[in-house]
Image (tube, rainbow, N blue to C red):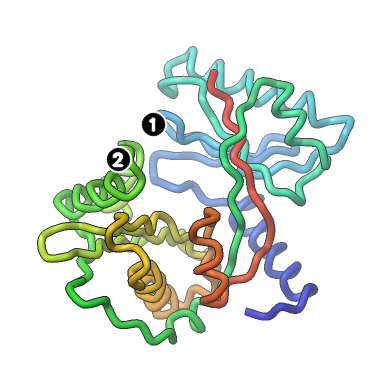
Amino acid sequence: MTTDRDALLKVRAEFDSAMRRNAQPDTSDARVERVGPVVRQIVPGAGGSTVLWSDLDESTADAAITEQVQFFTELAARGEVPDAEFEWKLYDYDRPADLGERLRTAGFVAEPAETLLVGRAADLAALSVEPPEGITLRVVTDEEGVDLMMEAHRRAFGSDRPRIRELMLNLLRDEPDTIEAVVAMAGDTPVSAARMEMRPGTPFAGLWGGGTVPEWRGRGIYRLLVAHRARIAAERGIPYLQVDASEDSRPILQRLGFEVLGVTVPWVWEG
């Protein structure tokens, strides 16, 4: 990627257009709606709905927040979603500048900030990365593979992720071409796992997961999983890889060539 500021702003504008303002549903049973200055995704499962983008100012922000809370509350009351929880995906360049504080005042709870990073798939696909000794990669194609992913995540992150399991099973069943998932195996033991989501016709593939169990960290597995997914994206003609990076993964990704486009904070309305 280039470090030229104007070029990065152009990539960011492309990201906002493709992945936020004109976003496609994440799954076949989800839907994306644009209502006035807000774009939102409604997901039937628990905790998956999101406000993806908004075009607000000081005079319209509070009313828009109230409208979205009311919408998801009524959706849950009608039984269309299991609860009223949803996420407002806020980026540090969104307006108004105090939108985060307005969300807090309205009762939203901030989750940890993540750095929005983007890299060119072709450049990352060219990385020379060999698996660490004792590690093989298993591509996930069925429920057994999904369960290996979940075991790796549980050991790496210390928690179960039932929503991710449900998402993976749905995508593999209904839209297998939109997902690439892989597990790093040490013999018969899963030690790391990651996935890539690719919506048809969009120029950004999203990288998710990548957690490695403590005893295998620092050996290049994370880098291996990035390079594997980059090769798949490049083969499909997808120009960019996008990551919402934690503070642990951000330095690794920047060393690989990813550039910072912004910082994002998920603000959650818990109902």
Report the label total.
2
Q: Within the image, what quadrant is residue 260 found in?
A: bottom right
In the depicted structure, whether residue 159 falls above or below residue 1 = above
Q: Within the image, what quadrant is residue 261 found in?
A: bottom right
Q: Earlier in the sequence, mark 1 or mark 2?
A: 1
Residue underneath mark 2:
166
Q: CA distance from mark 1 to mark 2?
A: 9 Å
Residue at left 39%, top 76%?
Answer: 227
- Tag 2, which secondary structure? helix
Residue 3 appears left or right of 226: right
Q: Residue type at mark 1: give it.
A: Gly
Residue 68 appears left or right of 164: right
Residue furthest toward the top?
77
Residue at left 44%, top 86%?
Answer: 126
- Where residue 16 sits in the image (x, y, percent)? 67, 56
- Which quadrant would the C terminus be assigned to in this image? top right
In the depicted structure, whether residue 221 falls above or below residue 105 = below
Residue 242 appears left or right of 13: left
- Where residue 207 sits in the image (x, y, percent)? 45, 61
Q: Residue type at mark 2: give it.
A: Glu
In the depicted structure, whether residue 171 falls above or below residue 179 = above
Q: Which mark is residue 45?
A: 1
- Which quadrant would the N terminus be assigned to in this image? bottom right
Residue furthest toward the front?
215
Q: Nearer the viewer, residue 71 or 247?
A: 247
Residue at left 20%, top 71%?
Answer: 135
- Where residue 165 sits in the image (x, y, percent)? 29, 43
Q: Determine contact: label 1, label 2, CB under 8 Å.
A: yes
Residue at left 76%, top 51%?
Answer: 93
- Where residue 37 sits in the image (x, y, percent)? 75, 38
- Tag 1, which secondary structure? loop
